[in-house]
Image (tube, grey):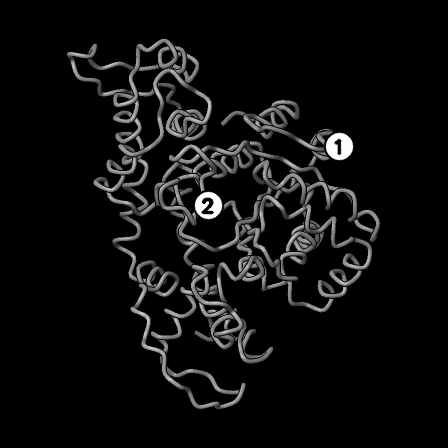
Amino acid sequence: MATLSAQEKISLITQGLQEVLKENILTDVIEKEDRPLKIYWGTAPTGRPHCGYFVPMVKIAHFLQAGCEVKVLLADIHAFLDNMKAPLDLVAHRAKYYELIVKSVLRAIGVPINKLTFVKGSDYQLKQEYTMDLFRLSSIVTEHDSKKAGAEVVKQVSSPLLSGLIYPLMQALDEEHLGVDAQFGGVDQRKIFTLAAENLPKVGFKERAHLMNPMVPGLAGGKMSASDPNSKIDLLDNPDIVKTKLKKAHCAPNEVEGNGVLSFVEYVLFPIAQLSGKSTFHIPRPQKHGGLVDFASFDELKTAYVAGDLSPPDLKAGVELALNALLAPIQEDFAKDEEFRKIEVLAYPAAVAAPKKKKEKKIGTGYVAKDKKKDAATAQAIADGKVKPENAVAQAVGTGAADAMAKLSMDQK
């Protein structure tokens, strides 16, 4: 790729973003300081990664093309703090699974992963300096502001846990402790980004830029969510499942607003095609409906769809074809990698039938269950909200600090 000018780098970094806060920081770093912009993108390893992950992966590709230094944060402690979406018995396995799947997605769209740095949150968030900074930040941020910051990110429940208030503060501190100039995420992160911008300077740290992707609607029309199977297609879904989910997807004729299938074409399929030097989207339309058709741009496709020249079934057929082509190398990686397959089972254990209740002997808080399969199933039930953490302390939060630290480490598994 030809050497880019400073302005071309900034244009590529901001391409397709919904909003950029403090864009002047990008200019200062790239033009005035003449060095690579340092960016981090974080993901909490909770539910199974879905096709919405292609959206940030495209931007990571852009960042790398612009010469940025990119860190991917596997936010394992955040996953644990967010209403136990990943209890301690599962979080280390899920962090490893996310690392493997994210790397596979990046390879599938042609992104060189050797230029990325993967960092696990617990590798630095448990250190003395980080803890002290967390205390310092918590002394100047109100409960109201922290709760407001996490409102669109942290799971909202009727009786919020204190852990949900810590989550936004840690995400702000990660900017300092990862040594970056900018944080990248979805526009749903905006309130956390604002909290970071307003409060990090108050504890002696510099303000960072914040880069925000638009939120892509799910297949059901609302937010694409790992916890809602009807809203998304998993990265390991086979072609038959992809076909079934797309068939059920909300895709009203002539309508663009809230159309998850059309948005997927706009924010995933066209940008990924452009990464490989292509610029067309193919629709395998039956001859009786006009025959095969290629669209050179999303605007051209949208115009045809709004005008009724492209029907929902034909649009879905094109998405199905393109999506399965993207998923094939990821699923091939999974099929041929024994570690990948083992980690998937450990990260997302199969549900088991709930045993009949019986009177249990009180054996003290130091007891750790020996049935690993049962422990894993209990942890999954906690993540699914079917079991309260206080009713399964060992699997949810550990029996003590040493036990919790061990659970966070894959070396101890």
Q: Are marks 1 and 2 in contact (CB under 8 Å)?
A: no
Quadrant placement of the C terminus: bottom left
Side of 344 where 188 appears, left or right? right
The part of the image, by quadrant, that contains residue 302 is: top left
Callout 2: SS: helix
Side of 197 where 367 appears, left or right? left
Give me the residue at 24% from left, 38% from top.
244
Q: Position of residue 341 (x, y in %)?
A: 30, 59
Q: Position of residue 379 (x, y in %)?
A: 43, 68
Q: Is 133 above or below relative to 216? A: below
Give me the residue at 51% from left, 45% from top.
115
Label drawn at residue 113: 2
User: Which residue ends up furthest to the left in the rendered image?
Assistant: 288
Label drawn at residue 28: 1
Q: Is 23 above or below relative to 88? A: above
Q: What's the distance in space between the residues labelled 1 and 2, CA to CA? A: 27 Å
